[in-house]
């Protein structure tokens, strides 16, 4: 075998591996084009115009009150009232104007407190979020003050 044939072989192998890797990555779905919540809370898409973002509860423990955090978005041209129902607590209602987002539990948002949390921190509450005539059941995460970013937000 000639010297040029031996020295060309590693280049051909490297090019084949690179082309194969490129083909495989082109087949994989692009995750960032799918809606998701890169956070501790839960995203709830009621329809194309109404959604809950990063929804969670911060509480000291089972049977204690809990502060609700997240945001409610109304992309429609009409005002809507969101209703959050959680097992073991009185429902919360939050009016949201057209094309607006209301934050829950932040300095510039509104305070939303559940009178009682029916699970331990680290668990999930069975919840229903509704706006108008659409609703969605979902698991609402419960956190406590163990993480420093939530310690100041306990009720």
Image (spheres, rainbow, N blue to C red):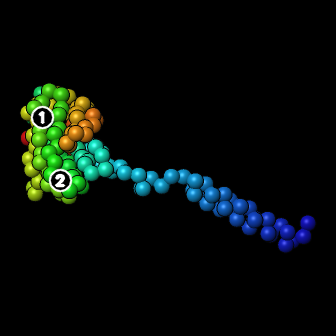
Image point (10%, 32%), residue name: 90
> How many neighbours does mark 1 have within 10 angstroms: few (below 14), some (14-19), or many (20 or more)?
some
Q: Residue furthest right?
A: 1
Q: Is residue 24 above or below residue 69?
A: below
Q: In front: 50, or 19?
A: 50
Identify the residue under disc 1. Answer: 91
Q: Quadrant of the N terminus?
A: bottom right
Depth order, front residue of 26/19: 26
Residue 151, image x, y percentages: 15, 45
Q: What label does residue 148 carry, if any?
A: none
Q: Nearer the viewer, mark 2 or mark 1?
A: 2
SS at badge 1: loop
Point out which mark residue 78 bears: 2
Can residue 60 be seen here? The reply is no
Where does the image place residue 76, in percent across and percent down from the top left? 23, 54
From this view, report whether residue 95 is shown above or below residue 124. Answer: below
Which of the 4 image quadrants contains residue 83?
top left
Q: Residue at x 30, y 46 (%)?
A: 47
Q: Nearer the viewer, residue 98 or 102?
A: 98
Q: Nearer the viewer, residue 52 or 62?
A: 52
Residue count near mark 2 (Cα–Cα under 10 Å), binned few <14, some 14–19, many ≥20: few
Element carrying mark 2? loop
Query: From the image, which quarter does the C terminus lie in?
Result: top left
Q: How many marks?
A: 2
User: Which of the 4 quarters of the picture holds residue 113?
Assistant: top left
Q: Give me the C-alpha separation between circle 2 and circle 1.
A: 22 Å
Labels 2 and 1: the sequence-earlier one: 2
Residue located at (26% from left, 48% from top): 51
On screen, residue 76 versus residue 107, left or right, reads right
In the rendered view, does 8 fall on the left or right side of 2?
Answer: left
Q: Residue at x 14, y 54 (%)?
A: 97
């Amino acid at each position: 075998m000639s010297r040029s044939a031996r020295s060309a072989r590693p280049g051909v192998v490297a090019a084949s591996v690179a082309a194969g890797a490129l083909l495989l990555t082109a087949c994989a779905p692009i995750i960032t084009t799918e809606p998701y919540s890169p956070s501790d809370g839960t995203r709830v898409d009621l329809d194309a115009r109404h959604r809950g973002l990063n929804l969670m509860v911060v509480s000291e423990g089972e049977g204690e009150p809990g502060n609700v955090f997240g945001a409610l978005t109304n992309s429609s041209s009409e005002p809507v009232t969101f209703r959050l129902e959680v097992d073991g607590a009185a429902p919360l209602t939050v009016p949201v104007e057209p094309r607006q987002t209301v934050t829950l539990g932040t300095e510039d948002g509104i305070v939303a407190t559940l009178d009682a949390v029916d699970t331990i921190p680290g668990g999930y509450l069975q919840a229903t979020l509704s706006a108008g005539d659409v609703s969605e059941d979902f698991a609402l995460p419960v956190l406590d003050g163990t993480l420093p970013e939530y310690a100041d937000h306990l009720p």
